[in-house]
Image (tube, grey):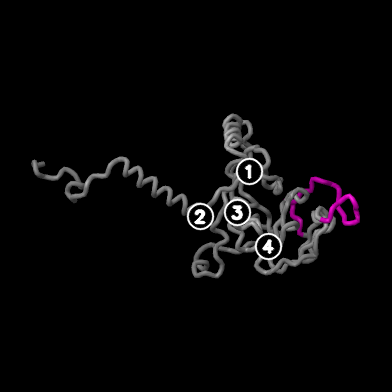
Amino acid sequence: MTKNEPDSEAESSGAPPHSGAREWYESLLVAGVFVLFVRTFIVQTYQVPTGSMEKTILIGDHLLVNKFAYGPHGTATAKWLPYRDVHRGDIIVFKKPGDDRNDNNVLVKRAVGAPGDVLQVKDKALSVDGKNADGPWVQHIFPEVLTADDPRVSEHDVVRDQFGPYRVPDGHYFGMGDNRDNSYDSRFWGPIPRQNIFGRPFLLYWSYEAEPNSHIWRGPVDKIRQLGSVAIHFFSRTRWDRMFRPVR
């Protein structure tokens, strides 16, 4: 190499060499954009805070949600990509009807009724279009059947065991928890608009014996306490037998 010969590609092109800090910044920026894209359009994580889907899904289960499954219906891209609409029996993740502006109010239930279906709950048993629709995943934790002629029970509570007949309106789905006696669902707050449904959980990647409703913000001190508890009890409270289960 002669004295005047450039000793690097950067020097030969006349561009200044990149600093280490700049390279780190660019790498983090690209990674951040990629993670944001994946979270927005493809996969999102979801922590289950309540027992409404037991025993299919437990409190403290952490799910991967496929946001790609229920893509925009009727668009040009839908012909070439693996989109499909919601099927009866699917477990769905959605924004609670009537609370669309609160992005944190996300629920998971099973879609038991599609547009046009006629549903009825009689003495706890669900029927769709006159046929029994309770699958093997359904459980009832309270043996008592609530009825309208019981003066001790409010009309609101009777809906748990006696509901309908009810026709699901167009563009909506009816969601219920598998833990039927302990689920606040479409029986109480109505059908789910199709546009509120954004994903389908497909994998349980971690399960931890968490406290019910631990996702509710109660201040920084409580959050630090929760994180400390997870760190201390990580191995003893992780449900290792549930790791990496498909969600059905």
Q: Residues in magenta?
A: 133-155
Horizontal and vertical percent for residue 143? 84, 47
Residue 159 highlighted magenta (yes or no): no
Horizontal and vertical percent for residue 87? 65, 62
Horizontal and vertical percent for residue 80? 49, 66
Residue beneath disc 3: 102
Distance, label 1 to label 3, CA atoms, is 13 Å
Q: Please identify the residue farthest to the top as the structure is shown.
A: 232
Mark earlier in primary sequence (1, 3) = 3
Q: Is residue 14 left or right of residue 202?
A: left
Asked if 143 appears above or below 76 in the picture, the reply is above
Mark earlier in primary sequence (1, 2) = 2
Secondary structure of the residue carrying tag 2 is helix
Horizontal and vertical percent for residue 86? 63, 62
Distance, label 4 to label 3, CA atoms, is 20 Å
Instruction: Please tell me how crowded label 4 is: few (under 14), some (14-19), or many (20+) other residues with Cα within 10 Å.
Output: many
What is the total number of numbered labels drawn onto the structure image? 4
Distance, label 2 to label 3, CA atoms, is 16 Å
Distance, label 1 to label 2, CA atoms, is 23 Å
Q: Is residue 27 left or right of residue 176?
A: left
Residue beneath disc 1: 216
- In this rendered view, identify the residue nearer to me: 79 or 115: 115
Residue 173 numbered mark, or none: 4
Q: Nearer the viewer, mark 1 or mark 2?
A: 1
Residue beneath disc 2: 40
Mark earlier in primary sequence (2, 3) = 2
Residue 150 highlighted magenta (yes or no): yes
Which residue type carries mark 4?
Answer: Tyr
